Image (cartoon, helix red, strand yellow):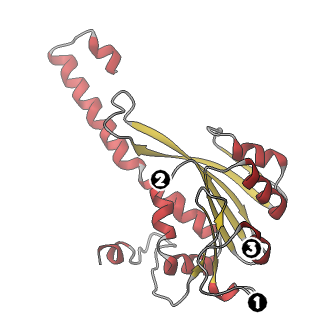
């Protein structure tokens, strides 16, 4: 019920109109690290079982001509080669997908746009020196396909993959709305982090005026 309330229509967010639907999303494992291929059920090719949620890498050839979302966790060289061949990716794109900590960029190619975005997340209490970490998400956005690639699980993507009805609504509007939804969630994650930093700055300002100490330089 709580998620249903949060997923309600937001007049300021074009992707927030949540309408229940009998659509389903077919998923496929891309390799063993958790890649997901998703397409709307009505686009399923003849001969593909509508009830299949996950499939093998070779099934990509059967569905790649339809609107599709491929999410890959911890991309391997073999998986990158599958994507390169299937979607005619430029070698530079493949190189960037395999290279962690790429710089933020937007590159336009003939068949697609390649983007690198960084979100933020709070780390565990074990990371006292650096409690906030950056999360890289790579996007390959074509006219009828989108590929998301990242290291480790990303809550916003996992949450979206667990709501097939809503993914169906996004597919109806276009695969670019899937990218927008992921970015929208990741941008929202910045606000509590920025508020936390602001609180820390206020604490430091009070300490400096009351009892300045050499150790404060390290904290600043």
- Tell me whether circle 2 and circle 3 mark residues in contact (CB < 8 Å): no
Q: Residue at x 67, y 59 (%)?
A: 31
Front of the two marks 2 and 3: 3
Q: Mark on residue 59?
A: 3
Front of the two marks 1 and 2: 1
Q: Nearer the viewer, residue 173 or 43?
A: 43
Name the residue beneath numbered marker 2: 187
Residue 168 image-quadrant placement? bottom right
Question: Residue 86, percent across and down?
Answer: 81, 64
- The vertical placement of 195 against 127, above or below, is below
Q: Distance between the residues labelled 2 and 3?
A: 33 Å
Q: Which residue is drawn at 50% across and 81% down?
A: 165
Question: Residue 99, percent across and down?
Answer: 69, 40
Which tag, 1 or 2, sits closer to the chain's start? 1
| Numbered disc 3: secondary structure | helix
Name the residue beneath numbered marker 1: 46
Viewed as shown, does residue 100 lie left or right of 91? left
Residue 53 image-quadrant placement? bottom right
Local crowd size for mark 3, using a 10 Å CA cut-off: few (<14), some (14–19), many (≥20): some
Viewed as shown, does residue 220 lie left or right of 100? left
Viewed as shown, does residue 8 lie left or right of 88? left
Which tag, 1 or 3, sits closer to the chain's start? 1
Q: Residue at x 50, y 54 (%)?
A: 153
- The vertical placement of 97 against 86, above or below, is above
């Amino acid at each position: 019920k709580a998620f249903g309330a949060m997923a309600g229509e937001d007049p300021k967010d074009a992707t927030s109109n949540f309408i229940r639907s009998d659509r389903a999303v077919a998923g496929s494992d891309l390799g063993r690290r958790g890649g997901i291929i998703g397409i709307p059920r009505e686009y399923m090719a003849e001969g593909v079982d509508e009830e299949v949620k996950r499939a093998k890498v070779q099934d990509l050839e059967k569905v790649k001509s339809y609107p599709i979302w491929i999410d890959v966790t911890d991309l391997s060289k073999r998986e990158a080669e599958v994507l390169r061949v299937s979607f005619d990716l430029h070698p530079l794109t493949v190189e960037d997908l395999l290279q962690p900590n790429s710089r933020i960029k937007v590159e336009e190619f003939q068949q697609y746009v390649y983007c690198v975005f960084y979100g933020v997340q709070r780390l565990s209490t074990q990371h006292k020196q650096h409690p906030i970490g950056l999360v890289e998400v790579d996007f390959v956005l074509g006219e009828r396909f989108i590929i998301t690639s990242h290291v480790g699980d990303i809550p916003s993507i996992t949450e979206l993959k667990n709501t097939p009805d809503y993914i169906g609504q996004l597919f109806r509007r276009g695969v670019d709305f899937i990218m927008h939804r992921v970015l929208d969630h990741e941008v929202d994650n910045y606000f509590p982090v920025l508020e936390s930093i602001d609180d820390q700055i206020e604490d430091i300002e009070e300490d400096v005026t009351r009892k300045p100490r050499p150790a404060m330089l390290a904290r600043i």
